[in-house]
Image (cartoon, rainbow, N blue to C red):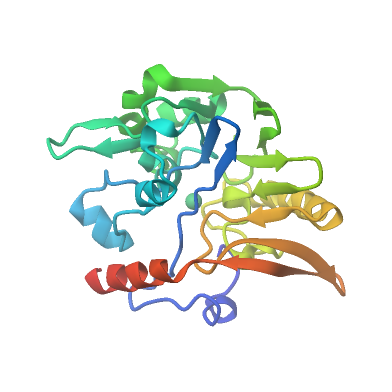
């Protein structure tokens, strides 16, 4: 929560005895004709036991979610990564029982900002090196499928990757526009429902002032044009409309996280 004191967020996001809060790893799937565009991939199954314990991470439901739709990983045609932190790109690979890592979506084209790949590939800064220490392991198996992009890019007609910066230098969000409806996944510039408020930003942000400026821009457009918005990490809300009441942003028409996820989540926190 960055500079926001714990007293202000602990009710809405109750921390456990290790001072961790519950977060989802939301990965929207955009289906249009024969195209299936996945936005971000979660942590995946590549973490070692020690790391899994630190984060209290259970195996994700991304592949289960796909099979519930009657889809296989090979049906994903595009993967757009908002940025290359491990909780967004870890799922681009799948650890096999033999311990090898393979591309999780073997027929997809992977869209990542070129600048993000460059930073992830090597930085003289200690914090940056730590933030991307997993990147080589994730990017190597998908190298032939990787399409570095530079700046705002149309992924398929009606689906755009738009650079915001802020969280990372080349962080991007995904905007889907149809004739009368639109949806924007704000990824890590608005990671939870609490972060629609200006000063509520992540301690992880490289440049919180840019995050504030960019999220204000997108949230204003979302209010004016009644876009659906979604967040990378909210534990309760998948998507909602955003409006303004007395100068304050409010959420409505919320689509909540389904109950079976609650069950999984309780199990995960007990294991941890
Ligand atoms: Zn994140």
User: Which residue is depicted at the point 87% across and 75% down?
Assistant: 246
- Coordinates of residue 126 in the picture (x, y in percent): 40, 40
Quadrant of image for the N terminus: bottom right
Asked if residue 205 can be seen in this view, the reply is yes
- Coordinates of residue 225 in the picture (x, y in percent): 84, 52
Residue farthest left in this picture? 98
- Coordinates of residue 86 in the picture (x, y in percent): 39, 44
Residue farthest top in this picture? 144
Judge left or right: residue 112 versus residue 248.
left
Asked if residue 122 can be seen in this view, the reply is no
Q: Which of the 4 image quarters holds residue 12?
A: bottom right
Quadrant of image for the C terminus: bottom left
The image shows residue 226, relative to residue 107, as above or below, that is below
User: Which residue is depicted at the point 67% across and 62% down?
Assistant: 240
Closer to the camera in the image, 211 or 70: 70
Judge left or right: residue 150 versus residue 260.
right
User: Which residue is depicted at the point 45% across and 27% down?
Assistant: 108
Judge left or right: residue 103 versus residue 69.
left
Q: Which of the 4 image quarters holds residue 163?
A: top right
- Tally of marks: 0
Q: Which of the 4 image quarters holds residue 195?
A: bottom right
- Coordinates of residue 88 in the picture (x, y in percent): 45, 44
Closer to the camera in the image, 128 or 44: 44
Judge left or right: residue 33 versus residue 53.
right
């Amino acid at each position: 929560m960055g500079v926001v004191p714990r007293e202000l967020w602990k009710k809405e996001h109750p921390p456990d005895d290790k001072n961790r809060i519950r977060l989802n790893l939301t990965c929207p799937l955009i289906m249009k004709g024969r195209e299936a565009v996945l936005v971000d991939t979660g942590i995946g199954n590549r973490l070692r036991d020690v790391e899994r314990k630190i984060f209290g991470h259970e195996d994700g439901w991304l592949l289960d979610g796909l099979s519930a739709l009657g889809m296989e990983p090979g049906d994903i045609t595009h993967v757009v990564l908002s940025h290359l932190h491990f909780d967004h790109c870890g799922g681009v690979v799948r650890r096999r029982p033999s311990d090898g890592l393979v591309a999780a979506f073997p027929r997809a084209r992977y869209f990542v900002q070129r600048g993000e790949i460059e930073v992830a590939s090597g930085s003289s800064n200690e914090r940056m090196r730590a933030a991307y220490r997993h990147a080589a392991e994730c990017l190597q198996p998908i190298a032939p499928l990787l399409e570095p992009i530079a700046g705002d890019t149309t992924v398929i007609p009606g689906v755009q990757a738009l650079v915001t910066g802020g969280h990372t230098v080349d962080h991007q969000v995904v905007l889907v526009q149809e004739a009368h409806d639109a949806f924007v996944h704000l990824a890590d510039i608005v990671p939870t429902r609490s972060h629609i408020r200006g000063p509520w930003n992540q301690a992880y942000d490289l440049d919180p002032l840019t995050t504030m400026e960019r999220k204000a821009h997108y949230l204003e457009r979302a209010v004016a044009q009644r876009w659906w918005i979604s967040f990378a990490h909210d534990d309760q809300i998948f998507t909602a409309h955003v409006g303004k009441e007395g100068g304050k942003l409010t959420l409505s028409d919320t689509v909540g996280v389904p109950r079976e996820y609650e069950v999984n989540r309780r199990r995960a926190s007990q294991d941890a």
